[in-house]
């Protein structure tokens, strides 16, 4: 059996520890998508904190309170609580107020399940917080996976609105920390796995102990594998009207990236599409990209699926379900691995942005992609104050990069209208397979930054 690793999350863990160490009450909200590592974070925090961690389940309030009572009796050596369990949330909260004067954490993981069992629970917590809890040293931590429900619980119409003292949004890991889940893989295999799984810990844990093709076939392309039906499951669990969200994501996955194209493909009205795109953006599933030199109101914006696994799922699972259902996925896996470079190219650009942010040729005030009338540049980074601008192409092929890529980049930059005559231009190429001698000579002459996989590996992989 695979056990979750605690990787990264130092910032979130430190925030929880600091809040716990202070005197006075805390009402902390921890939220984020499923599989992202919220429970692992809270369990790690509780290793050194005095308190109780309770995982809410889909059950009646009576069953939930009896289970809480049993866990509390065992943990605090109070057998009488098990024999006479709490029957209301009021009695449970009163118990902690009476019996815990020092710093003590009460963690409700998957809190929305407790609310579904008793919709008045937010009002109960509000009443106790206002009258009693905020005068104690209790640290109430509620955690939830359902973004829409967590937002409704904390929105201005909710009884809990304005009561939280802190909130922590748990998001996907970056490539650097994702690599720590894949210690057995080569650096190139880490890029491939990240292109499939993204930075979601639960997905990364499924890989790393077998060849990538084998992992795809056994842990994604099997009807009983959780990753096979993961996308529909997440949409059903996280969102109301999952059918509409699915239609929008499918449209984007097949290249309908402009708002009008998404509207035409799905058949839904503009108001509906913009509303649902906003929720998908909050979930970090979709992102509106604009050329880095444009302002946020630019009409050049396009929508892309931001989550690597969702991109993979729509391309290789959704479009090949019949083949997978008939246990004919081996040929599909072979094709994926054969065209691995193509699959990784898009994600490689994101990895290169992360690399440049760590390498820092200069301090960036903006970094992203750029396009205009058929011309595209993979990465453009700017500094609005110093007028420095970096132009970078990312090439993920098995061939060494020759001078043509660089000369084409030089030709395209004249269309980038930013910085005027004062701007200082820097050129950069990042190649999977390195560079020809001709390109190296030209780079030396023109002072072009050249990086290959070894340079990236030196940045991303920490020495043990």
Image (cartoon, grey):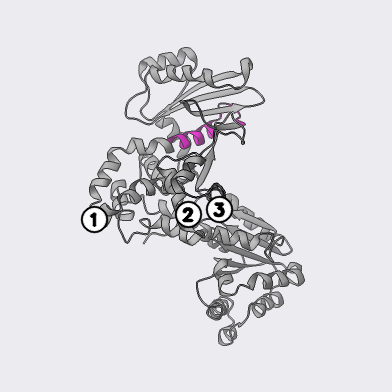
Query: Badge 3 local density, few (<14 within 10 Å), some, or many (20+)?
Result: some
Q: Residue at x 57, y 50 (%)?
A: 275
- Mark 1 nearby-residue class (10 Å; few <14, some 14–19, many ≥20): few
Q: CA distance from mark 2 to mark 1?
A: 29 Å
Marks 2/3: CA distance? 25 Å
Q: Which residue is mark 3?
A: 170
Q: Residue at x 32, y 26 (%)?
A: 399
State the separation of the CA atoms marked 3 and 1: 36 Å
Q: Main secondary structure of the magenta part?
A: helix
Residue under label 2, please give it: 244
Marked residue nearer the N-terminal end (2 or 3): 3
Which one is in front, 177 or 295?
Answer: 295
The percent position of residue 91, horizontal first and vertical second, equals 66, 80
Q: Is residue 408 above or below residue 231?
A: above
Provide the secondary structure element on which disc 3 rests. loop
In the image: residue 327, left or right of residue 281: left
Q: Assign the N terminus to one quadrant of the image.
A: bottom left
Q: Which mark is residue 336?
A: none
For residue 179, say whether it is visible: no
Q: Is residue 32 left or right of residue 209?
A: right
The residue range painted magenta reads 348-365
Q: Are marks 2 and 3 in contact (CB under 8 Å)?
A: no
Vertical side of 387 occupied by 458: above or below: below
Q: Which residue is mark 1?
A: 327
Q: Which type of secondary structure does the marked residue at label 1 adopt?
A: loop
Instruction: Give the mark nearer the N terminus: 3 vs 1.
Output: 3
Identify the image quadrant of residue 70.
Answer: bottom right
* Residue 288 placement: quadrant: top right
Residue 424 visible, this angle = yes
Residue 179: say if magenta. Answer: no
């Amino acid at each position: 059996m695979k056990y979750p690793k605690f990787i990264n999350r130092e910032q979130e863990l430190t925030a929880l520890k600091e809040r716990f160490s202070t005197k006075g009450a805390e009402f902390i909200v921890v939220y984020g998508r499923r599989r992202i590592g919220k429970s692992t974070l809270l369990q790690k925090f509780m290793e050194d904190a005095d308190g109780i961690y309770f995982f809410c389940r889909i059950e009646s309030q009576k069953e939930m309170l009896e289970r809480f009572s049993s866990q509390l009796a065992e943990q605090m050596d109070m057998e009488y609580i098990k024999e006479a369990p709490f029957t209301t949330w009021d009695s449970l909260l009163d118990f902690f107020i009476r019996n815990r004067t020092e710093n003590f954490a009460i963690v409700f993981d998957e809190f929305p399940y407790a609310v579904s069992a008793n919709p008045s629970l937010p009002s109960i917590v509000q009443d106790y917080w206002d009258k009693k809890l905020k005068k104690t040293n209790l640290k109430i931590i509620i955690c939830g996976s359902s973004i829409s429900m967590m937002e409704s619980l904390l929105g201005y119409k909710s009884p809990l609105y304005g009561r939280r003292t802190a909130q922590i949004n748990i998001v996907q890991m970056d490539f650097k920390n994702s690599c720590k889940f894949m210690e057995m893989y080569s650096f190139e295999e880490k890029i491939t796995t990240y292109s499939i799984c993204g930075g979601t810990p639960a997905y990364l844990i499924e890989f790393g102990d077998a060849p990538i093709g084998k992992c795809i076939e056994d842990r994604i392309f099997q009807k009983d594998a959780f990753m096979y039906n993961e996308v529909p499951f997440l949409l059903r669990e996280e969102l109301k009207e999952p059918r509409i969200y699915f239609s929008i994501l499918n449209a984007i996955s097949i290249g309908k990236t402009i708002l009008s194209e998404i509207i035409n493909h799905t058949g839904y009205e503009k108001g509906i599409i913009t509303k649902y795109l906003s929720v998908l953006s909050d979930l970090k599933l979709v992102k509106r990209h604009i050329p880095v030199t444009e302002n946020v109101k630019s009409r050049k914006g396009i929508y892309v699926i931001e989550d690597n696994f969702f991109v993979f799922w729509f391309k290789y699972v959704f479009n090949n379900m019949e083949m997978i259902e008939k246990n004919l996925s081996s040929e599909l896996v072979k094709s994926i691995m054969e065209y691995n470079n193509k699959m990784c190219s898009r994600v490689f650009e994101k990895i290169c942005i992360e690399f440049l942010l760590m390498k820092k040729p200069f301090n960036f005030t903006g970094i992203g992609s750029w396009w205009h009338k058929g011309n595209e540049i993979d990465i453009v980074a700017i500094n609005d104050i110093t007028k420095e601008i970096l132009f970078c192409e990312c090439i993920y092929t098995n061939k060494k990069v020759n001078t043509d890529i660089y000369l084409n980049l030089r030709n395209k930059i004249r269309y980038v209208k930013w910085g005027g005559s004062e701007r200082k231009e820097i050129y950069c190429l990042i190649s999977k397979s390195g560079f020809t001698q001709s390109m190296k000579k030209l780079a030396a002459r023109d002072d072009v930054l050249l990086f290959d996989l070894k340079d990236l590996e030196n940045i991303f992989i920490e020495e043990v």
